[in-house]
């Protein structure tokens, strides 16, 4: 299924004549990158997520030590524990023990440490340590990342998709109530979808924000239409209230 998804994303990149989709480059609604990003979202939801054939799990923290602009590398273990939580959670939900792991080589994260820790962790019916998520497997089983390869995002559309979802999650947190309020104002009450027109007299910063609101809105209303339990108004940022949903936004530090 990932191969099928990769092919569809690659087709979108070629069709829009775009080399790479990155959330940081979402600045204007008419730009090819933004159009490709919207097509990415439509593909993952309409062609894959609603059939439970792939998952997107996005974890977000408000911890200042994990802020991308002021990252404290002395707190690296905290970041590694955060990634450990989301990976262990995904392993549990899929019920598989053998995995391949392909992170973005440009992330600056010590992936080898995370994978080494994961590969030493056995599946147990009950785990006492609070950072270990309960995994419903036999006591002697162990999940294994047998293949680990850092990938260049320019060459791997799936990494670009991950960047897009991570960017939307973080932006919705940082922008607080503004994104939710904007979606409420710009929603078409008859269709439950975003209106396409935008004000042309606003400054670059405001236009860039509105473009990102629109992108988040495309995802939000698609998820609502298909009953995927993604919310933005309840806590003023992207949040999935049913973690089983294949589009899962969750906050670090909270357990299900």
Image: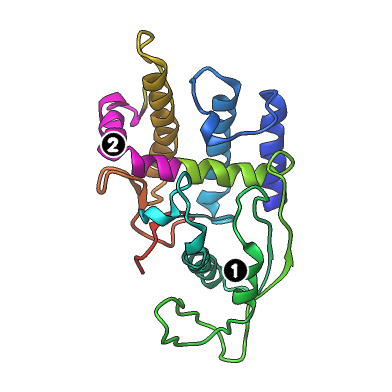
Relative to residue 174, is residue 195 depicted above or below?
above
Q: Position of residue 152 (x, y in %)?
A: 72, 45
What's the image's color scheme?
rainbow
Q: Earlier in the sequence, mark 1 or mark 2?
A: 1
**Mark 2 surroundings within 10 Å by alpha-carbon count, few (fewer than 14), some (14 through 19), many (20 or more):** many
The residue carrying mark 2 is 180
> Based on the displayed image, in which of its 4 quarters is residue 168 positioned?
top left
Relative to residue 177, is residue 187 depicted above or below?
above
Lateral position of residue 73 relative to residue 130, left or right: right
The residue carrying mark 1 is 114
Residue displayed at 26% across by 43% down: 233
Q: Nearer the viewer, residue 192 or 219?
A: 219
Q: Seen from this angle, which residue lies furthest top? A: 201
**Residue 42 appearing in the image:** no
Relative to residue 17, is residue 154 depicted above or below?
below
At mark 2, the secondary structure is: helix
Q: Position of residue 4 (x, y in %)?
A: 70, 47
Q: Seen from this angle, which residue lies furthest bottom? A: 140
**Mark 1 surroundings within 10 Å by alpha-carbon count, few (fewer than 14), some (14 through 19), many (20 or more):** some
Query: Label 1 to label 2, Cα distance in Å?
Result: 34 Å
Residue 219's tag is none
Tell me the chief SS of the magenta region. helix
What segment is highlighted magenta in the picture?
168-193
Residue displayed at 42% across by 17% down: 204
Residue 15 colored magenta? Answer: no
Relative to residue 100, is residue 160 depicted above or below?
above
Q: Position of residue 162 (x, y in %)?
A: 57, 47
**Disc 1 vs disc 2: which is toward the camera?**
1
Q: Position of residue 203 (x, y in %)?
A: 37, 14
Image quadrant in which the C terminus is located: bottom left
């Amino acid at each position: 299924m990932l191969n099928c998804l990769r092919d569809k994303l690659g087709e979108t990149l070629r069709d829009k004549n775009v080399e790479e989709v990155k959330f940081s480059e979402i600045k204007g609604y008419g730009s090819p990158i933004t159009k490709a990003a919207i097509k990415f979202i439509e593909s993952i939801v309409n062609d894959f997520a609603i059939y439970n054939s792939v998952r997107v799990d996005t974890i977000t923290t408000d911890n200042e030590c994990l802020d991308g602009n002021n990252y404290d590398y002395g707190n690296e273990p905290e970041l590694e524990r955060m990634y450990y939580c989301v990976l262990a959670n995904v392993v549990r939900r899929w019920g598989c023990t053998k995995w391949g792991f392909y992170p973005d080589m440009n992330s600056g994260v010590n992936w080898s440490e995370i994978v080494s820790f994961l590969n030493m962790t056995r599946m147990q019916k009950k785990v006492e340590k609070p950072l270990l998520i309960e995994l419903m497997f036999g006591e002697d089983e162990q999940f294994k990342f047998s293949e680990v390869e850092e990938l260049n995002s320019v060459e791997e559309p799936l990494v670009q998709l991950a960047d897009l979802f991570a960017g939307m999650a973080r932006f919705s947190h940082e922008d607080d109530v503004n994104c939710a309020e904007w979606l409420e104002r710009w929603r078409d009450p008859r269709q439950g979808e975003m209106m396409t027109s935008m004000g042309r007299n606003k400054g670059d910063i405001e236009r860039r924000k509105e473009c990102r609101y629109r992108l988040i809105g495309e995802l939000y209303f698609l998820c609502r239409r298909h009953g995927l339990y993604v919310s933005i108004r309840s806590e003023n940022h992207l949040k999935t209230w049913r973690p089983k949903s294949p589009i899962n936004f969750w906050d670090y530090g909270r357990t299900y």
